[in-house]
Image: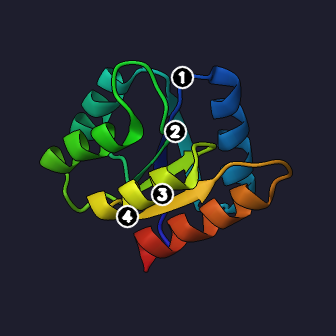
Amino acid sequence: MAEITVLAVDEGPELLELTETFLERGSDDITVETETDTGTAIDRVRDGAIDCVVSDFRMPGMDGIELFEELRTHRPELPFFLFTAADRDVEAAAAEAGITGYVQKGSGTDHYDELTQQILVAVDG
C-alpha cells in the first residue's frame, strides 16, 4: 500500500492535532498535513501531492461543502470526507453534493478509526 497524504482542514488547531495523531496512529500508511485556512487549503491541494482531504463543516469563510465544491473544480477525483459534529442534515447535503464520505465526530476515538478505514478504502480501493 502506498503512503497516503491527507490534508485535514479545521479552524481549530487542537482538533487538527487530535485528527493528525489518531489518523497516523490508525495506519502507518497515512501522513497528515493540517490547515486552518480554507483558501490556503485550496492552494495546497492545487499545488501539492495531497491524496485525500478531511474537512470540518463549520469554518470561517466557507463551509466544508463549499470547500469540496471548490476543490472539485481543480481535482475532481480527490477523495473528500466531512469530519464534523454538525447534525445529520449536513450528512444528507454532503451525499447530495457527491462528497466521498461523512464521519460524525463524537466522544471517544471510534470515529477516528472509522475515518481511517474510510480513507484507506477510498484512496487505495
Q: Amino acid at mark 4?
A: Ala
Quadrant in which the C terminus is drawn? bottom left
Label 3 close to label 4 by CB (< 8 Å) = yes
Q: How many residues crowd mark 2 within 10 Å: few (<14), some (14–19), many (20+)?
A: many
Q: Which is closer to the viewer, label 4 or label 2?
A: 4
Which numbered disc flags the more N-terminal residue, 4 or 1? 1
Residue that lies at the very extreme toward the front in this rendered image: 89
Mark 3, Cα crowd under 10 Å, few <14 / some 14-19 / many 20+, is some
Residue placed farthest to the bottom in the image? Answer: 125
Q: Are marks 1 and 2 in contact (CB under 8 Å)?
A: yes
| Residue in view at x 61 percent, y 60 percent | 115
Viewer-closest of 90 and 6: 90
- From the image, tell me which residue sits under label 2: 56
Query: To which residue does mark 1 refer?
Result: 11
Q: Secondary structure at mark 2?
A: loop
Q: Is residue 84 above or below residue 124?
A: above
| Residue 52 coordinates in the image, percent (x, y) | 41, 54
